Amino acid sequence: MLAYARASEEEYHVVCAELMIRNEYLSLNKLDWGVAISGLDMFTKTLACGVEGCGKLFASRGAIRKHYAGAHGVKGAQIPTQYNITTAQCMDNNHHRMLFHVVPPPD
Ligand SMILES: [Zn+2]
């Protein structure tokens, strides 16, 4: 059986640099409002939170309602029923899924 030595983190960064690949997950700030990334699914009916300074995105009405209640303390009938619809893509880093705004490619 072959034994593999574990590479150090430093070596890992060197390899990533040589291959010109990112060795860390892109932050949401860098992705938001960028050009759509080819190969990722496009979500054309993503719901955006309307609270100023928030703007988090959700794939379903249930999820955005939960967000209004949990993150903004808005309850029951106070929760908006109309949401801004936007185009988004999704990253999944195995810990959580995150939706980010994208500029859709021209048709
Ligand atoms: Zn919000």
Image (cartoon, rainbow, N blue to C red):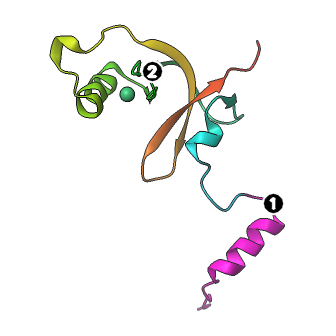
Question: Residue 18: within the magenta?
Answer: yes
The answer to whether the residues at label 1 and label 2 have Cβ atoms under 8 Å apart is: no
Question: Residue 26: within the magenta?
Answer: no
Q: Where is residue 78 in the image (x, y as percent from the top left)?
A: 21, 13
Of badges 1 and 2, the one in the foreground is: 2
Q: In this view, does 36 lie to the left or right of 44?
A: right
Using the rendered view, name the quadrant where residue 82 is placed.
top left
Give SS at disc 1.
loop
Residue position for label 2 = 48
Q: Where is residue 30 in the image (x, y as percent from the top left)?
A: 65, 41
**Residue drawn 71% across the image and 80% down it:** 11
Looking at this view, is 68 or 14 the one in front? Answer: 68
**Residue drawn 75% across the image and 58% down it:** 21
Using the rendered view, name the quadrant where residue 23 is placed.
bottom right
- Mark 2 surroundings within 10 Å by alpha-carbon count, few (fewer than 14), some (14 through 19), many (20 or more): many
Which residues are the magenta region?
Answer: 1-21
Q: Which amino acid does label 2 sit on?
A: Ala
Residue position for label 1 = 20
Extreme residue toward the top, this view? 82
Quadrant the N terminus occupies: bottom right
Q: In this view, does 37 lie to the left or right of 66?
A: right
- Mark 1 surroundings within 10 Å by alpha-carbon count, few (fewer than 14), some (14 through 19), many (20 or more): few
Find ligand 1 in the image and state its quadrant: top left
| Residue at mark 1: C-beta within 8 A of ligand 1 | no
